[in-house]
Image (cartoon, helix red, strand yellow):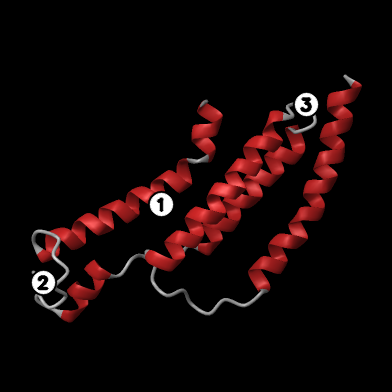
Amino acid sequence: MQLVLLIFTTDLVNIGFWIMGRLSRCWDKKSCNSNSRYTRQLSQEDYENVNTGPDTEMEVKYANILVVTYVTMLYGSGIPILYLIAACFFFATFWVDKWMILYHYRKPANFDETLALKTLSWFKFALVLHFIGGILMYSN
């Protein structure tokens, strides 16, 4: 249970930040009305800070994906439930990140394929770790 909670902590924190953002917008407009003209903010910069979400931290998201992949590949031969937990993590992360990018985060900067290709190149080492972990688990 603790492992599952540890893996899904990032998604739960993202949803918590979304809820806090919605509550701060409700507080700003008093009684959560949809009138966009009314605000408690005095400057345009303060208004934009309240009504737009944070920047997307893509490097943190890719780091979480790599950590789950490496742990699953290293220990998955001995603990097969890790494959199911990793699949649930990737499923939940995909949908939470998709929803957060569409409805919460600011418009992301123009990313090119460099980060994705670099991350993809690290998967070769995960495969090697899977072989090493499998040999160690099955030979013992």
Q: Look at mark 1 in the image and give the residue it sits on.
A: 14
> Vertical placement of 104 versus 77: above or below?
below
Viewer-closest of 20 and 122: 20
- Label 1 and label 3: CA atoms lie apart by 31 Å
> Vertical placement of 131 versus 125: above or below?
above
| Furthest-front residue in this view | 34
Is residue 49 left or right of 37 when viewed as pictured? right
At horizontal 38% and vertical 71% (from top left) the residue drawn is 106
Viewer-closest of 126 and 104: 104
SS type, badge 1: helix
- Label 3 and label 2: CA atoms lie apart by 57 Å
Is residue 18 left or right of 6 when viewed as pictured? left
| Furthest-top residue in this view | 140
Is residue 51 left or right of 35 when viewed as pictured? right
- Label 2 and label 1: CA atoms lie apart by 25 Å
Q: What number is the disc on residue 52? A: none
Q: Amino acid at mark 1?
A: Asn
Image location (x, y in percent) of residue 138: 88, 24
Q: Residues within 10 Å of mark 1 (few under 14, many from 20)?
A: some
Q: Look at mark 2 in the image and give the residue it sits on.
A: 39
At horizontal 69% and vertical 46% (from top left) the residue drawn is 69
Q: Amino acid at mark 2?
A: Thr
Q: Look at mark 3 in the image and give the residue it sits on.
A: 78
At horizontal 59% and vertical 49% (from top left) the residue drawn is 91
Res 55 seen here: no
Q: Amino acid at mark 3?
A: Gly
Image location (x, y in percent) of residue 45: 21, 77
Viewer-closest of 130 and 103: 103
SS type, badge 3: loop
